[in-house]
């Protein structure tokens, strides 16, 4: 696994044990001891293991924030708190799995692999909460509201061309009053920003005499 995995655990001895085991199993681990440290890493990860009792806050609150930030992130809560209320709170708050310490390390690894089949699928993702586009190779571009509206309309078309009129109206503009050069400029700037960040072309093509089309499938999250 090359995609970074966040490990939020404040007990340093356990953090070291888990990090060594997971790295030996092929995971790219980014370890944090506090919520503040973890928050600085969330744009880089697609998987996370989170404790509940942390020195600067509640892991439940962090998981809720992480889930709001990324609908596709695979999240495992790993904690000594085993009460039914805690488990329900964690799962309702955004965790995919809730494991109780002490955990069997092979079970933890298997749980992560099961999550990875969903969270790390190689596809393009358009994230509404984060207003961002993520490529299969992990490149992330933050979007303006207008850019997100443009891409969401194209993504919903599933490879079919979308007319300029439909795009303009989806962005909340009146078609007859809209200067179409604004749309061309928006697309041109989006392509340029993506090229600078990713080093390759955005799969957003001009449909001759029609509008625009995304030539890859993009999931909305």
Image (tube, rainbow, N blue to C red):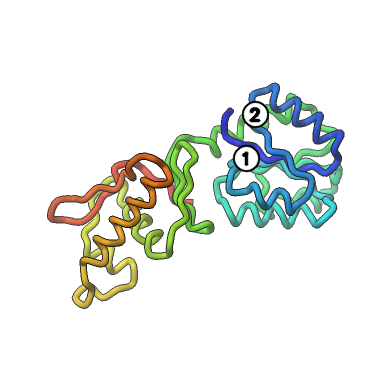
x and y percent of residue 112 in the render?
65, 33
Residue 6 sits in which quadrant?
Answer: top right
Label 2, label 1: how many angstroms apart (C-alpha)?
A: 10 Å
Query: Mark 1 sits on what residue?
Result: 47
Residue shown at 75%/25% (left/top)? 21
* Pointer 1 local density, CA inside 10 Å: few below 14, some 14–19, many at least 20: many
x and y percent of residue 71 in the render?
56, 50
How many numbered callouts? 2
* Pointer 2 local density, CA inside 10 Å: few below 14, some 14–19, many at least 20: many
Whether residue 105 is visible, yes or no, is yes
Quadrant the N terminus occupies: top right
Q: Pick whichever of labels 2 and 1 is earlier in the sequence.
A: 2
Residue 150 sits in which quadrant?
Answer: bottom left
In the rendering, which numbered label is found on residue 148?
none
Residue shown at 48%/58% (left/top)? 131
* Left or right relative to 198: residue 8: right
Circle 2: element type: loop
In the rendered image, the residue lying farthest to the top is 24
In contact (CB < 8 Å): disc 2 and disc 1: yes
Query: Mark 2 sits on what residue?
Result: 27
x and y percent of residue 85 in the render?
81, 53
Whether residue 97 is visible, yes or no, is no
């Amino acid at each position: 696994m090359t995609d970074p995995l966040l490990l939020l655990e404040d007990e340093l001895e356990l953090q070291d044990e888990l990090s060594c085991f997971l790295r030996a199993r092929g995971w790219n681990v980014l370890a944090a001891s506090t919520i503040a440290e973890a928050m600085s890493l969330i744009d880089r990860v697609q998987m996370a293991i989170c404790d509940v009792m942390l020195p600067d806050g509640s892991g439940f609150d962090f998981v809720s924030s992480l889930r709001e930030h990324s609908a596709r992130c695979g999240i495992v809560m790993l904690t000594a708190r085993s009460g039914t209320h805690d488990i329900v709170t964690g799962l309702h708050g955004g965790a995919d799995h809730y494991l109780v310490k002490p955990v069997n390390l092979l079970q933890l690894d298997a749980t992560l692999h099961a999550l990875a089949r969903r969270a790390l699928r190689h596809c393009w993702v358009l994230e509404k909460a984060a207003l961002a586009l993520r490529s299969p190779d992990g490149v992330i571009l933050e979007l303006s509201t207008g850019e997100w509206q443009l891409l969401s309309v194209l993504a919903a078309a599933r490879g079919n061309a979308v007319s300029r009129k439909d795009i303009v109206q989806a962005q909340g503009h009146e078609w007859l009053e809209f200067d179409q050069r604004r749309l061309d400029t928006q697309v041109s700037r989006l392509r340029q920003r993506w090229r600078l960040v990713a080093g390759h072309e955005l799969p957003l093509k001009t449909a001759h005499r029609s509008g625009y089309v995304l030539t890859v499938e993009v999931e909305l999250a």
